[in-house]
Amino acid sequence: MKKSKKSKPKQIIFAASIVVVLVTLVLFYQIPTNSESINLDMNRQIGTVDTSLGSPIMGSSNAPITIIEFGDYQCPNCKKWFLNTKPDIVTNYIETGKAKLVFVDIAFLGKDSVPASIATYCAEEQEKYWDYHGFLYSNQLSIDSGWANSDSLKGYAYNLGLDMDLFVNCLDSAKYQKRVQFNTNEAQENGVTGTPTFFIVGPDGIQEKIVGPQPYPVFEKVIESMS
């Protein structure tokens, strides 16, 4: 009588191992590591947008209205909004506690867009996110003209007094690349096709979309209707 083969359990174990490895790889490439999650609230779902991997909140986290800005640091219209509209919003709504602002990257305009976004999160490690964010828009030139290449990004960090060893290591290793990609995907999933695009989310969850560098009165009208 022939002995029965006992290879099936080994095959099952081997197959199960492959499944575990594949699942692990999928999770690795989709979910940022702990080192990428510094200063983040992982439950920050605002309206239809997951902002958990976006910027730190500007303003009070308890503010009833949230302004979500989708932008690319190489976007000329984003710079226009930053210079012409944002100051009044900060003065009248952010600083008064009526609204808060979250920036979510959609880094798609050029090869330097992703490194620029990564650099802001490297600055966040040293509690300089919004300073660096503003420095980028204030110094913006034409797309991929060198103003946002690696050397320039390091120069901005030096000018802001950041610890250069920490910053350079963070930037050169592309430490926050998955975070930037997550945000870019989130923008696309929410139908963002151009920058800047804004979602204003009220206390009851009602959401209004504003496209382009609209003047202050456009934002004022929407925000006041939610107050």
Image (cartoon, helix red, strand yellow):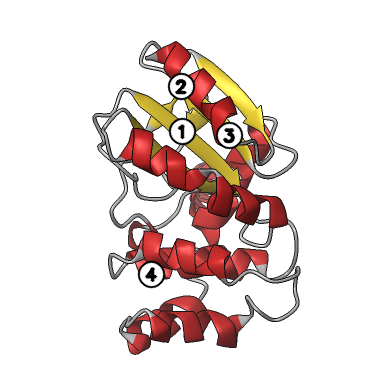
Residue lying at 58% horizontally and 72% vertically, measured from the top left: 139
In the rendered image, which residue does mark 3 sit on? 198
Q: Nearer the viewer, mark 4 or mark 3?
A: 3
Residue 67: image tag: 1
Q: Amino acid at mark 4?
A: Ala
Residue 136 vs 39, above or below: the answer is: below
- The residue positioned 29% from the left and 40% from the top of the image is 95
Image position, residue 145 (x, y; %): 75, 78
Label 3 or label 2, whichever comes before in sequence order: 3
Q: Are marks 2 and 4 in contact (CB under 8 Å)?
A: no
Q: Which residue is mark 4?
A: 123
Asked if the residue under mark 2 is in contact with the one under mark 1, i.e. CB atoms within 8 Å, the reply is: yes
Q: Amino acid at mark 2?
A: Ile
- Mark sitting on residue 119: none
Report if the CB atoms under discs 1 and 3 are less than 8 Å apart.
Answer: yes
Q: Which one is in front in this view, the residue at disc 3 or the one at disc 2?
A: 2
The residue under label 1 is which amino acid type? Ile
Depth order, front residue of 190/198? 198
Q: Amino acid at mark 3?
A: Phe
Question: Camera-side residue: 118 or 158?
Answer: 158
Q: Distance from label 2 to label 4 (Cα)? A: 30 Å
Q: Is residue 8 above or below residue 160?
A: above
Determine the secondary structure under disc 1. strand
Task: Please report the residue visible at 48 percent of the width from the left and 13 percent of the height from the top.
Answer: 206
Q: From mark 1 to mark 2, how far is it between C-alphas? A: 9 Å
Work out which quarter of the rendered image holds the C terminus and state it: top left
